[in-house]
Image: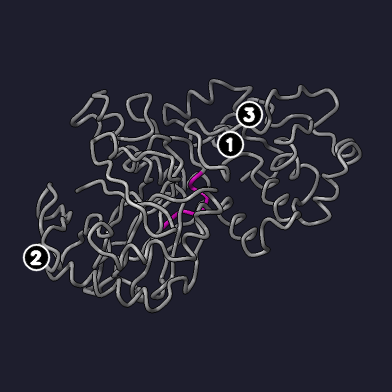
Amino acid sequence: MPKEPYDEDYYLAVNPDVVDGIAAGYFVNGYHHYRLHGREEGRICAPVFDAAWYGRIYPMATIDIENGRARGAWDHWQRIGRYRGYLPNPGAPRPENPSRMTARFGGLWTDAPDADDTIAGRHAIGALSDGDAALLRDWIANGYVILPCAIPSHLLDVACTDLDRAYQGGMPSLLFQCLSLSPNDMPWRPEINSRPAKALDLHWHSQATRDLIFAPAIIHFLHLIFERPPLASQSLGFLRGSGQPAHQDTAYVVYSQARRFAASWIALEDVTEGAGELVYFPGSQRAPDFIYADRYKSLHEAMRMNIAGGNSLREAEEQHGRAIIRHAEGQGLREESLLAKAGDVLIWHADLAHGGKPISNNATRRSVVTHYCPADIAPLSFEAGRCDLRQHETSGYYSTVVY
């Protein structure tokens, strides 16, 4: 990353040709272009910044710096002040709506440019505890939070029993996805158990799984980011790791608002190396949008609208995977893996790049993944006619994308 003052938003705003180059795949981001060409060409990479004026004119900036929210005046303006409408110098133009959502496809309130100020304000007036404020800041910075030992043992035990029953053929109406055996969803067969597979919407068939995915610690965090009751729209039960390449859920999991959802991964047993551990790239939720058919955030939305199809969309899907890795390398994002303990929960942002390590041994990795949205957002499955909405006690709602 740059050592000299550099501002990505400014550089892209004054260099539209660089924006075109990023869209065409020539550059990972503006700084990639600046490092290769812009510096030598003498392009201006940041607005003129008057640190002394900034500190004198905006007293809250000085207080924020003293309290450790920023390293200095420039860092404060880049990350915080600009979204309040603070100017970098007395002659700079003021943006019309500095705190507007910058993401093309929207998001949760935590995706707003001034989300850090919202957290600080709620914390200051007692609406957020110290722990919740810290969790939300981690969520914004990394795109995920880890809730250790979040599932009570009594919930864990019965959910694990139901998962095992599913993989023993004890739920006849439950369908599985096992692409190495069939491209279509299928009833349980013994061969499934030795391969990467998913029990589809296990929560629809299992009370124990519903109690698991609506565990109090999970619901508490979902309340923080959704600010309303959650809807669990899809779940996947795993006996083994997925071995899935890095991907973003927004390409496959579709809602009426593309980025207004989150997912949880719950470990039902201790995860060991070689069992297909979950991997993710912290910070990757801020990657540029990968666009399908020049317009759509999701592969499935492009397919629904019949905009190109077949091989062209599958090729785009492969390009998306390569774009994720290219962005991570360009931004210096490190791949991290999670050797979770039974009862640990990972909750991740809709756009966090994640996947599963290759499986190198015969160990199991019992776990449940669930996708949630605010209850007033509609999953794509509703529009396909699967709009049976049920309430789970007082915790929220659940539906299915399969049955």
Q: Nearer the viewer, mark 1 or mark 2?
A: 2
Q: Residue furthest right?
A: 56
Badge 3 amino acid: Tyr
Q: Residue 23's image quarter?
A: top left
Query: Would you place residue 56 above or below residue 293 in this image?
Result: below
Give whichever of discs 1 and 2 has the lower sequence position. Answer: 1
Residue 208: horizontal and vertical position, in percent? Answer: 30, 68
Residue 259 bears which disc, if any?
none
Q: Secondary structure at mark 2?
A: helix
Label 1: how many residues lie within 10 Å, few (<14), some (14-19) or many (20+)? Answer: many
Residue 310 lies left or right of residue 107; in this view the side is: left
Would residue 272 be visible to someone looking at this image?
Answer: no
> Residue at image x 10%, y 62%?
172
Q: Is residue 130 visible?
A: yes
Q: Position of residue 134 (x, y in %)?
A: 63, 60
Q: Amino acid at mark 1?
A: Tyr
Where disc 3 sits, the SS reads helix
Q: Which residue is mark 1?
A: 31
Q: Which mark is residue 11?
A: 3
Report the residue at 50% width, 44% height from top: 330
The one of 299 and 128 positioned closer to us in this rendering: 128
* Residue lying at 67% horizontally and 62% vertically, measured from the top left: 129
State which tag comes first along the sequence, 3 or 2: 3
Residue at image mark 2? 191
Residue 265 belongs to magenta span: no
